[in-house]
Amino acid sequence: MLISDIIAAIEQEAPLSLQESYDNAGMQVGDKSALCTGVLLCVDVTPSVIDEAIERDCNLVVSHHPLIFRGLKHITGVTPQELAIIKAITAGVAVYSAHTNLDSASRGVNYTLARRLGIAKPSPLECPDPANPGIGLGAVGDLELPLTPMKLIERVKLVCQSPITRCSALPCSMITRIALCGGSGASLINAAIAHKAQAFVTSDVKYHDFVDYSDRLLIIDIGHYESEMCTKHIFYHILSGKFPNFAVNYSETEKNPINYL
């Protein structure tokens, strides 16, 4: 099996055409025409993840966050990103990333989070193409069962394996309709309000967003890594379903770069 076969399976579910204009999803380094010996799945590509791929004989790393997001002026190994690139190229490890295209895919990050949180029929918060109503950023919908604000927070922490959350003031009413966006989704708060969501789950919310919107809906910030951990499971589901006898592995060395003390 070629690395290009793995990439084709992912892009069938999350085409690169869905990525945002600022993004750099797709092949990061390597030769996609090479035979694939194994796949290692992660959120972030770090030097330790590349070392793990080499040790486990995986010559393809599939990540959510692109290894190369902005232009590089040099690759000398002085940063973790540069070192990961050098290690990957030296060892013949290819790196492929599916970022905002996986966020917007019809069964991507936001759909997966929505179903895990109990939204019965999620739909995108922003749908750029009416001809494809299931594709777009964020997700919104009615919960299968109403929850108290505290019960919703507890469910979010359980689903996202988040030890803590940052929240605005808890409303007194039951929550029946929620919106969410994996990753940094504060720019979609107004869309959540427009869709009549009573709560919005995302990460990287700024202080002044809490100030400006806390009287409009319950904001639950779960942390960036926690909101996108599900990407590894999405990749695994795609690849194990397409290639049931092929070696697809979760990274065992990757960890959340943020520590809660």
Image (tube, helix red, strand yellow):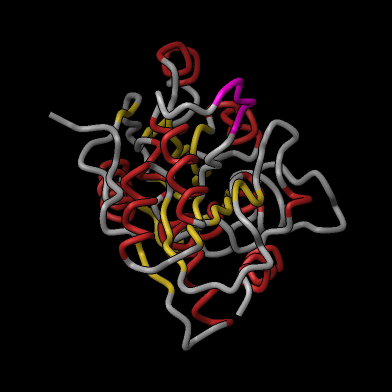
**Residue at figure coordinates x 37%, y 33% from the top left:** 221
Percent of width and height locating residue 25: 65, 45
**Residue at figure coordinates x 38%, y 34% from the top left:** 220
Q: What quarter of the picture does the N terminus occupy? A: bottom right
Q: Is residue 130 shown above or below 171?
A: below
Residue 13 visible, this orientation:
no
Q: Is residue 70 magenta?
A: yes
Viewer-closest of 176 and 164: 164
Viewer-closest of 47 and 40: 47
On the picture, is 62 further left or further right than 33? left
Q: Residue furthest right?
A: 131
Q: What quarter of the picture does the C terminus occupy? A: top left
Percent of width and height locating residue 183: 49, 38
Percent of width and height locating residue 187: 60, 26
Residue 202 visible, this orientation:
yes
Q: Quadrant of residue 87?
A: top left
Viewer-closest of 183 and 2: 2
Q: Residue furthest left?
A: 261
* Region in magenta: 69-74
Q: Residue furthest front?
A: 90
Q: Is residue 163 magenta?
A: no
Q: Main secondary structure of the magenta part?
A: loop
Viewer-closest of 118 and 252: 252
Q: Is residue 2 shown above or below 96?
A: below
